Image (cartoon, rainbow, N blue to C red):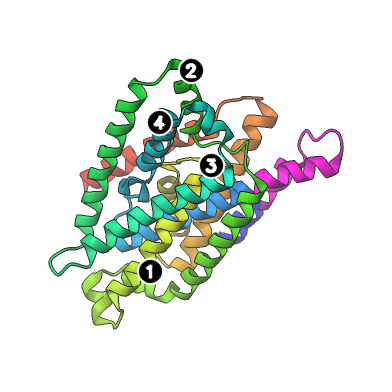
């Protein structure tokens, strides 16, 4: 199955790079290659963070978005337009904006997790609940500021609130790639412990796992990966839920040495293949994230309905 998914990802990448290519190949390969690398990084970050989050929460219908990452991203973009104006958002240095957004999202999530998780009578469920509450707060704050915006500024803001793979800065890819590679090396060193964590907190502690330390490391990785992918292209709320559950169904196993690469490969096929169909076949200008979020939302409702029947 992993070999088949790898072949599918390579085929999707080859078709994306060559289909409808006209003109100078040096320009085409550089332009499309940047988008391809960006989509691969986002696919890896979203898939890996979702699988890790579902492992530590032991719930396959939860994603890191419940911690309010997408709501915080929308609040940051809205605040910039509200206080500085839409013009400042367009001329702001993208590299500096990327670093600031990633630091704010990862920093706040880590502070929240450390505050709520390391207490004596506190735990992971309280962290998730607090994340949901803060997410509602940030969404409400964003909506309040958006209602006061000028219509032209609101249109500019809307373009920033949907994930887009058409404009990815090459210099941002380098920073994102370094961060993703560093977190992936750490996650691979924790593979055996991840399988034990999936058995539950009490079982993991009885088997000798330093539960709090490992969960703190995992949550830091999740916060960094989600922050980087969101700051790079924008929020993709239900995409991780979709690819993670497809990986579970396709492989029929919970072992992370298989589910992590499978979820990443499925994410690459979905992003690269979907972008190819949208751009090269149908010529649509709409954002691929809209279709992904729609499909992921349906998958979320189906999973929720299946769990309720049980």
Callout in the foreground (4, 2): 4
Q: Is residue 224 left or right of residue 197?
A: right
Q: Which of marks 4 and 1 is in front?
A: 4
The span picked out in magenta is: 10-37
| Other residues around mark 2 within 10 Å, as few (<14) / some (14–19) / many (≥20) | few
Between disc 1 and disc 2, the foreground one is 2
Q: In the current view of this chain or complex, which residue is farthest to the top?
A: 151
Q: What element carries label 1?
A: helix
Q: Earlier in the sequence, mark 4 or mark 1?
A: 4
Q: To which residue does mark 4 refer?
A: 83
- Looking at the image, is mark 1 or mark 3 earlier in the sequence? 1
Name the residue beneath numbered marker 2.
152
Q: Which one is earlier in the sequence, the residue at label 4 or at label 2?
A: 4
Which x, y percent locates residue 152?
48, 17
**Front tag of 3 and 4:** 4
Left or right: 202 in relation to 186: left
For marks 3 and 2 on the same chain, the one whose residue lies earlier in the sequence: 2
Q: Which of 128 and 307 is in front in this view?
A: 128
| 19 is within the stretch colored magenta | yes
Query: How far apart are labels 4 and 2 at the CA level?
Result: 15 Å
Residue 192 at least partly seen: yes
Q: How far apart, in angstroms, are the residues tagged by discs 1 and 2?
A: 43 Å
SS assignment at label 2 = helix
Give the quarter of the image for residue 118.
bottom left
Q: Residue 42 at x, y = what percent?
A: 54, 49
């Amino acid at each position: 199955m992993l070999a088949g998914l790898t072949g599918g990802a390579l085929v999707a990448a080859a078709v994306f790079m060559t289909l409808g290519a006209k003109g100078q190949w040096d320009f085409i390969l550089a332009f499309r290659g940047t988008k391809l690398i960006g989509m691969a990084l986002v696919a890896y970050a979203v898939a890996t963070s979702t699988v890790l989050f579902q492992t530590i929460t032991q719930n396959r219908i939860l994603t890191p978005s419940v911690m309010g990452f997408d709501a915080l991203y929308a609040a940051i973009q809205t605040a910039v337009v509200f206080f500085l104006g839409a013009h400042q958002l367009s001329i702001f240095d993208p590299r500096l904006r990327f670093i600031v957004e990633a630091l704010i999202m990862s920093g706040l999530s880590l502070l929240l997790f450390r505050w709520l998780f390391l207490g004596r009578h506190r735990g992971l469920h309280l962290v998730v609940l607090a994340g949901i509450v803060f997410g509602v707060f940030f969404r409400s704050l964003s909506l309040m500021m958006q209602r006061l915006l000028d219509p032209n500024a609101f249109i500019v803001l809307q373009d920033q609130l949907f994930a887009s793979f058409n404009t990815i800065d090459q210099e941002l890819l380098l920073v994102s790639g370094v961060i993703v590679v560093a977190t992936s090396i750490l996650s691979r060193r924790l593979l055996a412990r991840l399988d034990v964590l999936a058995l539950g907190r009490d079982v993991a502690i009885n088997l000798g796992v330093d539960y709090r330390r490992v969960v703190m490391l995992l949550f830091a990785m999740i916060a960094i990966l989600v922050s980087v992918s969101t700051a790079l292209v924008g929020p993709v709320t239900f995409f991780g839920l979709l690819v993670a559950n497809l990986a579970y169904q396709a492989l029929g196993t919970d072992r992370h040495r298989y589910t992590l690469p499978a979820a990443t490969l499925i994410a690459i096929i979905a992003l690269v293949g979907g972008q190819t169909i949208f751009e090269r076949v149908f010529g649509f200008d709409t954002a691929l994230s809209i279709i992904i979020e729609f499909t992921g939302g349906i998958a979320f409702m189906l999973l929720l309905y299946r769990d309720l029947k049980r």
